[in-house]
Amino acid sequence: MKIALVGQPNAGKSTLFNSVAGYKSETSNLPGTTVKYTESRVRVNGDVFELIDFPGTYSLSATNDAEAEVREYLVSSNIDLIINVIDASQLGRSLPLTLELMELDVPMVLALNMYDEARRKGIDINTSELSGILGIKVLTTIASKNLGVRELFYAVKNIIKNSQQPERKRIRCQKDVEEVIGELEGYLRENLLLNNPYPHRFLATKLLEDDDYFLKSVAGENGTHLSHKIRKLQNRLVQLRGKPQDTVLVLERHTTAMDIFGQVVKIGHPVRDWREKIDDIVMHKIAGYVILVGVLVAFFYGVFEFGAIVEGFLLSGFDKINAVLPLYLDSNGFSFHLVKALLWGISGGVAIVLPYLIPFLVGLTLLEDMGYMPRVAFLMDAFMHRIGLHGTAVIPVVLGYGCNVPAVMATRILPSRRDKIIAGVIASMVPCSARSVVIFGLVAFYLGPLWAFFIYLFNIFVIASSGKILSHLMPEVSPGMVLEIPPYRMPSFNVIKKKTWFRIKEFITVAWPLLIAGSLILGMMEYFSLDHWTNLALSPLTAFLGLPMVVGTTLIFGVLRKELSLIMLTQALGTTAVISVLTTTQILTFTIFVTFYIPCVATMAVLSKELNRNWMLITVGITLSIALVLAWIVHISGVFLL
Amino acid sequence: MEIEKIGRQMKSLLEVPSNRHVKIVSIIGGKGARQILAQLGVGVGSTVMIRRNAPFAGPLLIENHGTSIAVGRGVAAKILVEEV
């Protein structure tokens, strides 16, 4: 049984998905968290379902890449049933998508999610009446608390297995508009040449909505007669409603939805909502920015203070183990080098990465799930305009602080290709959690947190300048920001725990083994003096930046995973007391270089997929040159000033 | 009818101060922003509330049927409204 979870952004599709599939799809209180679909085989009430979690979509007219993908997939693959997930507190706004989905003639169930929130807002939905109007089974769920989920899947099974589907009702528009749709629908039924998978009425609506995709694919292949027909009927719609043809039907669906909403909903007295009051301050034109800076500083120092204490404690432990090692093994022998290299790899992960990574990810999850990120987009809109983008582009950029890979994917929520390219390139320059580990573990730990803070600020400055230059090279008016601001939500402890684990798991299962293997390779290279050759090959670079020759090899490993360069740096230098062998300038030069140079392989892969190979290569070129120039400037000014 | 429209006070969304209700008369420009707004239920004929419009300071915040929407100043300039 193939089940699709479809709904508007931030309705809780992924939360519902995770409640039955385990934590597999990232969730947050941020419209557009899911940009690609996640599939999973799940077992609920003893039945096996193939469940697909789709990105949120406001409608089936694709205004961005993520939405286009939903529509493609929904029609082209044989889906047995659609679970239309709806934020119950936003029922009126969500129903237009339901009406569109009904046109696809696929069995459907409505899940009124976040039902508790609707109740708090004083919204009382008569579900049986709603079900009667639509001819669709309606259930209520609170996915975050796992309530109503089993009942939902029980109903899904009954519909598919026993065809216990209520009789589907046809929801029609008002008579005058309906006549226009009917005329095109009839025309398509008789004259359509190509074999199309879409129901005729759905197709007629999309063509009348001026949907570029269908105009090109259907009208293009069916000759000018159809195009004339469409044009003529569109004009009639414009005359009837006095609105541009591309929005008549969309707004018509909204009117119908509001009608239904009015019939099934009683609005009582909402429990006083403190959240709007908070927004008056959080999104205030002055206080908002003060809070933003405060949040960032608190976040930064919180992560650092926690990480530094743990790092110091753990490193001293590993140093003790290292100190006693020569007592048991011959310090010139092969096995000594092997064990030592292994120890470097393990201690690097435990003592250097995890102490910063865990608080960093917990903090980021908190901010995302509370719903602070869209507020950041709101506050940053003016700033983003300065660099030629708009507020929506903040979302990929802030996601980049977690990991650049989902950040580059998130550029799919931007409607224009040009915005997508610029946001993708600058998102890959944001210091991700792996690079933050280098900044925290090296700069903050040895030189003090102020230096690290300065690096972050400097990075923002460089990103802004790069964005400015890129948008200057690609002049085009971007469509501007239209972004829904979701209400604040209290993240549950359980979700934070699972989401942080979901992200850390990636480090433990992928990066850490790589790190240990890398340490072993470096250890062997050192034992057989092979590292001499790679270091020699990179010596022009290291000499140019005034770095010791031994760090050369670590820079190669850094392309695989950014954390590797820090951990292998300590190994290459042969000590964790980095400050005793490197000068302040050298530490800063190294960090600046690692922060900016070449995105890691995973980011490169996603860049070529989302933008294209050329843009990936351009990004590599840009970041490498920026890294070289900046690191050199740091090196030179260090020589003169410090 | 046309004369009546011009006769009434028509202005861009940018010129409307906070906490006013306005009716959208027209959305000029390309269909990009217009369609995204329509998906959120905002289009010609809708009545929306301006929750925040700080002059020269970032986007506007408008409310439509309980949904808060941030609208960039560029987009807002293209939305023509009349106060109700």
Image (cartoon, rainbow, N blue to C red):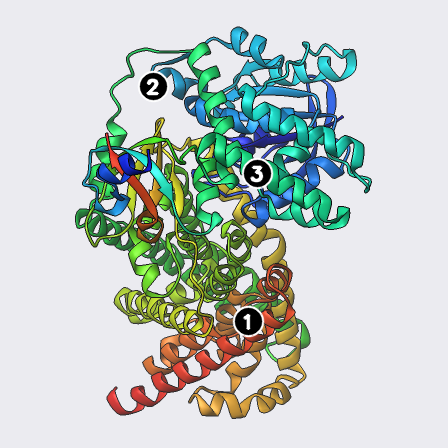
Among numbered discs 3 and 1, the one appearing first in the sequence: 3
The disc numbered 2 marks a residue on which chain? Answer: A
Residue A194 screen position, x and y as percent: 81, 42
Residue A219 screen position, x and y as percent: 70, 46
Q: Which residue is found at the position 55% from the left and 23% from the top? A: A176
Among numbered discs 1 and 2, the one appearing first in the sequence: 2
Q: Which residue is mark 1?
A: A558
Q: Which residue is found at the position 72% from the left and 16% from the top? A: A157
* Closer to viewer: mark 3 or mark 1: 3
**Disc 3/disc 2 C-alpha distance (Å):** 39 Å
Name which residue type carries label 1.
Gly
**Disc 3/disc 1 C-alpha distance (Å):** 57 Å
Q: Which residue is mark 2?
A: A121
Q: Mark 2: which secondary structure?
A: loop
Q: Mark 1: which secondary structure?
A: helix
Q: Residue A234 has which mark?
A: 3
Horizontal arrangement in the rendering, residue A436 relative to residue A162 (left or right): left
Residue A145 screen position, x and y as percent: 48, 22
Q: Which residue is found at the position 52% from the left and 7% from the top? A: A129
Q: Mark 3: which secondary structure?
A: helix
Q: Residues within 10 Å of mark 2 (few under 14, many from 20)?
A: some
